[in-house]
Amino acid sequence: MSWTLGPEDLPDLARGAALLGTGGGGDPHVGRLMVQEAMREHGPVAVLDPDEVDDDAFVIPTAMMGAPTVMVEKIPRGDEAVTALRTLERLLGRRATATMPIECGGINSMIPLVVAARSGLPVVDADGMGRAFPELQMETFGVYGVPGSPMVVSGDHGETVTIDTGPDNIRMEWLARGATIRMGGAALIAEYAMSGADVKRTAIPRTLSLGLSLGRAIREAREQLRDPVSALAEALSTTIYTHLRVLFAGKVADVERRTVDGFARGRARFTSFDGTSTLRTQFQNETLIAEVDGEVAAIVPDLICVLEAESAEPITTEGLRYGQRVVVVGISTPPIMRTPEALAVFGPACFGLAEEFRPVEVVSEYHGSDRGTHSRPA
């Protein structure tokens, strides 16, 4: 069923979208403020259930592209994504019926809402990653046959770059990344234009409403003095994400982070509260792998989410700081993201990781660990 998203929903949505963003997808505070301002000027946004989108509808996804470390300081002007969408419409000779996120995240679940509020278009309740990934070819849209180009990259000085690489989404990413770097490290994009039938066939459904429900579950658990991580696990159990496993609880001991080639790349090390165990992670915008005492506990494309220990507020990779008290959880991805075709595009090998993908729920059972039970730090 389609529904209306208003300003009162934004704090919960930003929190839940940041959780699904696995450390990437942009700063949730910035994303929320951008939509809040657009809604203040133009009103609430209509959200379409993917099953209700006409097969012959024309959907143009919109997003922000760049390193999250840059996005914290380089706030969009606000109209760049609309410019990208309108430019792509003119190129293709067809007006969009709706826009849609390309990924989940604190900013990238929000950019299509900004576009919707400013343009009057509805937003489809779905996306092409079911989480956040750092590169444009890493989308279920492309995995299942929708070309990403032609696409438009829009900068904050009014400039646009049009890229058309036919079916080669990897080259599209490479060219768009170069344009984004030269626009200051962050830009707004419109890409993967598709029919409503393609949306139903290739998208991860209802991730906006999922983000809203997860953010609400965390908030309500805190208000009721319940464990928010347990509330999250309960909320996920009836969705296509199904499994949540607590991988680690402890403190941030060290963070190595740098902005390279348009990405935020780095590693983080965490120590348990009693000092007997260590978690190490690697990230490229998003967290890619979590190893506990040298053993893989979760790996991409499953979600690895760092949460503030008491509140379960998601912490982005650019927000990691020494001394933070955290709980790290792994969340299983939907089946559409675990097929051989999908793993060939965004599985571990695509990030240079030697380890093979094993589902987080299987790895957790194999380890026989009690990390699956959340407990408060002393």
Image (spheres, rainbow, N blue to C red):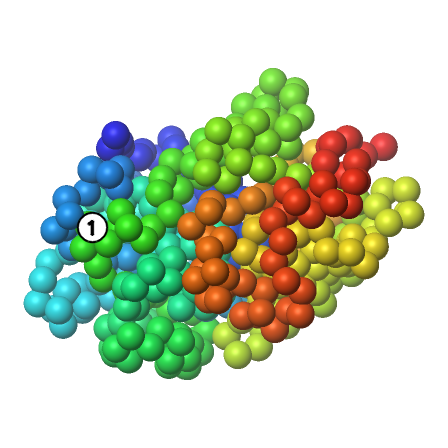
Q: Quadrant of residue 212?
A: top left
Q: In terms of depth relative to the viewer, which is nearer, 45 or 19? A: 19
Q: Is residue 205 above or below residue 230?
A: below
Instruction: Measuring from the top left, give residue 315's x and y in whole percent.
Output: 61, 48
259 vs 290, left or right, is: left
Residue 67: in sight, yes or no?
yes
Q: Residue at x 54, y 23 (%)?
A: 220
82 vs 179, left or right, is: left
Q: Residue at x 86, y 49 (%)?
A: 277
Give the amino acid at mark 1.
Answer: Ala
Q: Residue at x 27, y 72 (%)?
A: 149
Q: In terms of depth relative to the viewer, which is nearer, 239 or 253? A: 239
Q: In terms of depth relative to the viewer, which is nearer, 258 or 243? A: 243
280 vs 28, left or right, is: right
Residue 27: in sight, yes or no?
no
Q: Which residue is mark 1?
A: 197
Quadrant for the N terminus, please: top left
**How would you rate the neighbour count of disc 1 (Cα within 10 Å): few for under 14, some for 14-19, many for 20 or more?**
some
Q: Is residue 377 above or below residue 324?
A: above
Q: Residue at x 23, y 62 (%)?
A: 193
Q: In terms of depth relative to the viewer, which is nearer, 132 or 320? A: 132
Instruction: Measuring from the top left, give residue 95's x and y in whole percent.
Output: 11, 58
Q: Quadrant of residue 152?
A: bottom left
Quadrant for the C terminus, please: top right
Count of marks, rendered view: 1
Q: Is residue 360 above or below residue 238?
A: below
Q: Secondary structure at mark 1?
A: helix
Q: Residue furthest front?
A: 340
